[in-house]
Amino acid sequence: MNSKDTRTQFLNFFKGKGHKIVPSAPMVIKDDPTLLFTNAGMNQFKEYFLGISQSKNTRVVDTQKCLRVSGKHNDLEEVGKDTYHHTMFEMLGNWSFGDYFKEEAITWAWELLTEVLKIDKESLYVSVFEGSEDADKLEKDHEAYALWKKIVPVDRIIMGNKKDNFWEMGDQGPCGPCSEIHVDIRSKEEKAKVSGASLVNQDHPQVVEIWNLVFMQYNRKANGSLESLPAKHVDTGMGFERLCMVLQGVQSNYDTDIFTPLIREIETITNSDYGKNEEVDIAIRVISDHIRAVSFSIADGQLPSNTGAGYVIRRILRRAVRYGFTFLNTKEPFMYRLVNVLTDSLGDAYPELKDQKQLIENVIKEEEFSFLKTLDQGLVLLDTIITNTKGKTVDGSKAFELYDTFGFPIDLTALILSEKGYELDEAGFDTAMQQQKNRSKSASVVSKQDWEILVDDNEQEFVGYDLLDVEVKITKYRKIVSKKDGTQFQIVFNLTPFYAEGGGQVGDKGYLEDTHGDVVYITDTKKENNEIIHFAKNLPKHLGESFKAVVDKKQRSRTESNHTATHLLHQALREILGKHVEQKGSSVHSKYLRFDFSHFAKLTSEELHDVENFVNARIDGQLHLQEQRNVPMKDAVEAGAMALFGEKYGDAVRTIRFGQSIELCGGTHVKNTSEIWQFKIKSEGAVAAGIRRIEAITGDAVKDFHVDNDKLLSKIKDVLGNSQDPVKSVVGLQDENSNLKKQVAELLKDKAKNLKGELLQELQVVNGVQFLAKHIDLDAGGVKDLCFEMGNNKDNLFLLFGTEQNGKAFLSCYVSKELVASKGLNAGTIVRELGKYIQGGGGGQPFFATAGGKNPDGISEALDKAKEYLQ
Ligand code: ATP
Ligand code: MG
């Protein structure tokens, strides 16, 4: 059975059991401080498990794009080396939110695998939580055991410990026992020799876990204790690629139809063979895996970069490039050429890949190109490190520097060193790495207390589209402490006018005021698990009372101007540059807006002008906000709203329309474009291959901008002696300046000629060499010309000149070529040695070299020493 059919069959099976099929959430997570990437199917449903909100459907089924390369789940180092862990993979899952529990979950999983998909029952093993003796004192999962016993012989039910069979979302939050299903795909002969049961959870490549059924029945509190959850949930996750491996009767995920087209293409491009040599095979697996992770991430809007999620992606891509470089001998970008095959095979299930294909290719190509350059530079640096190494062991901290600052991979360093007969001081490298980890860890440590619940109210309401000032009650709060921000309080209200950071727009600030006149400032507003959380430095004194919650109107209205201007800018770019323009990132602040979009060339000043005019025309046009809330997604898209990939939208969306600009948007906007007053682009530039960034301002900020420009202009006029036409004055000055420069150059030439005549007279003969060491007054270029001209006139010449410029000292040394050979004089060595007198260094060639330093007083001493080279 091919993989496409398997995916459909899974979804349809659970649809038949009353589940609603929902789409995968984005793999790249925005607006969640705790997680960069989706690493399990349950991430997008966290809020339901935490009881913060209720799902419309209590039974749901989906396939989720996951990435396991950072944080709690990090499989990166296994990937390629084994045959069943990927960075990016699909997780099939069925979900019960307070609906069915263990019985249905277990029987349906068994029915699907053995009756629908017809996997041989004899090859399946299941595991059950055995209980724990530790502080939690948990009982064995009797319920699950009894259910399995009805369908599976007891010798294939394996009891598992807490590590394998008790699942926790994090340090706090929902958790519970789980049952895993493992499959043994070894041959009959092997099975006869060693029982499968003994290989479960032993990292055997052919006895692997395919499905995990998690039964969430507890909540882990901040103090570490467990409490029972009022509603119990089921969360299951099955590795799609592993399931396909089993169903297609192959021994490796990479031998399924999900990977073989990619592998064939890699073989063709790199002229290699899969299946002949283990190192080559690992490289091919790594590349075929990583191209998926990187492409999906770019399609979700996360480009490689130097920080956060972008850095994770960059490292994955570099890992693949490096494997290619080392084992497949690829010295030029090649990964981008795989995107074609990838979109052919997954483009139907994930249309974002098809839509963004060009961008994905461009970004990957550019990244490969620049990393290959880094590799080249790293190789040169590594050579220098080796040259400066005494003995045969290379300092680990040096290797770490190479890794940390230049992204030069440590295993490549080790490999090259061993090829050259050197060893890497690995302990030193590990120490340097650990020190850096500690530094960044201690900068971000956060401790959170349990929520103090004041009012049991799960239905929080955002009223800030219409109101900026309402009466609220505090429903819960907690204290958090982080190194960066110190002590803060997170406060949740029953309803709130505060907009929480999201969709690129910053969170509102403002204050809470009680009836006694006590005020607490709200410094920021963010969403966590879809709940609006207000940040404050202090807690209100009278927690149980009512408060007036007031949003900072000035900041809000400036932010709204920038948000609406962002929509108009987006529209302008698509009208003026073309429909290939897509939003790639946006951040809307009160002071400015920033907009990233796909486009392949620098904008001309004419285009920038047109864009500004387009937006300003719509501001002058006084367009009214037309807002629709709770529109079904389908209707919104049909009406022409721009839907962005990589955004997670609920079924019902909000549309924002100003004239012809229609977008799906949860942000806040002006009521009429005239409020924006004016729009001004401040800068345009590149952020990555094929991605441009515009920064712009509106309203008051534009006024300030003009006022500043006005001041600048008056200052310039002032400096030009009250010129009425500053442009003419400046052009005049430029002309004058270039004439003067020409005159100076000629005078200097004359001077050098005269000087040359004088200096030739001053030469002394020392040990048969024409010698002169002297302090002269010329610029660097002049000295060099002088030396070579003197050299044309005289053989056997050894010159050392000291000069001074802008408070710095310079030494220039010239040695006739014949002396280099006959006397072993080397200008490079000489200036390097004499450089110490002027507190500097330098170098060059044996016949001419220069040094620069910061101590002009040392010049005469250096000149005095010159003669010694002739002794
Ligand atoms: P393993 O022990 O094999 O790493 P896990 O315990 O980390 O698996 P879960 O977190 O329970 O796995 O995830 C549910 C399912 O997702 C697993 O049963 C497996 O089929 C699949 N899975 C987990 N990690 C990966 C991965 N890196 N690549 C492919 N599939 C995976
Ligand atoms: Mg794992």
Image (tube, rainbow, N blue to C red):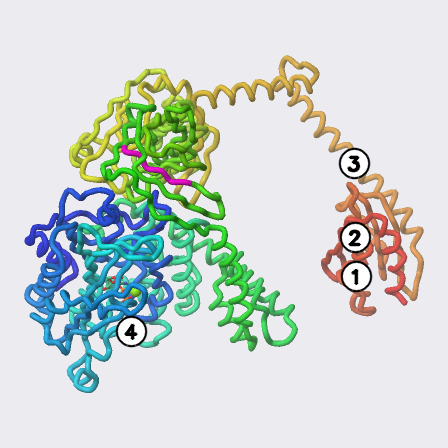
Q: Which mark is residue 833?
A: 1
Assign the magenta stretch its main secondary structure. strand
Q: Earlier in the sequence, mark 2 or mark 1?
A: 2
Q: CA distance from mark 2 to mark 4?
A: 72 Å
Q: Which residues fall within the magenta stretch?
A: 489-494
Asked if residue 851 lies left or right of residue 619, the reply is right
Residue identifier under label 3:
746
Q: Is residue 686 above or below residue 70?
A: above
Residue 203: numbered disc: 4
Would residue 501 be seen by someone viewing this image from the given angle?
yes
Q: CA distance from mark 1 to mark 3?
A: 35 Å
Q: Are marks 4 and 1 in contact (CB under 8 Å)?
A: no
Rendering quarter of residue 799: bottom right
Q: CA distance from mark 4 to mark 1?
A: 61 Å
Residue type marked 2: Phe
| Residue placed most toward the observer, 552 or 704 | 552
* Residue at horizontal 40 percent and vertical 44 percent from the top: 479
**Circle nearer the N terminus (1, 3):** 3
Q: Position of residue 31 (x, y in %)?
A: 34, 42
> Sequence order check: which comes first, mark 4 or mark 1?
4
Q: Report the Cα–Cα distance between label 2 and label 3.
A: 19 Å
On the picture, is 638 further left or further right than 26?
A: left
Location of the C terminus (image quadrant) = bottom right
Pointer 2: what residue? 788
Mark 1 beta carbon near ligand 1 (under 8 Å):
no
Residue depth check, mark 1 versus mark 3: number of the one nearer the observer = 1
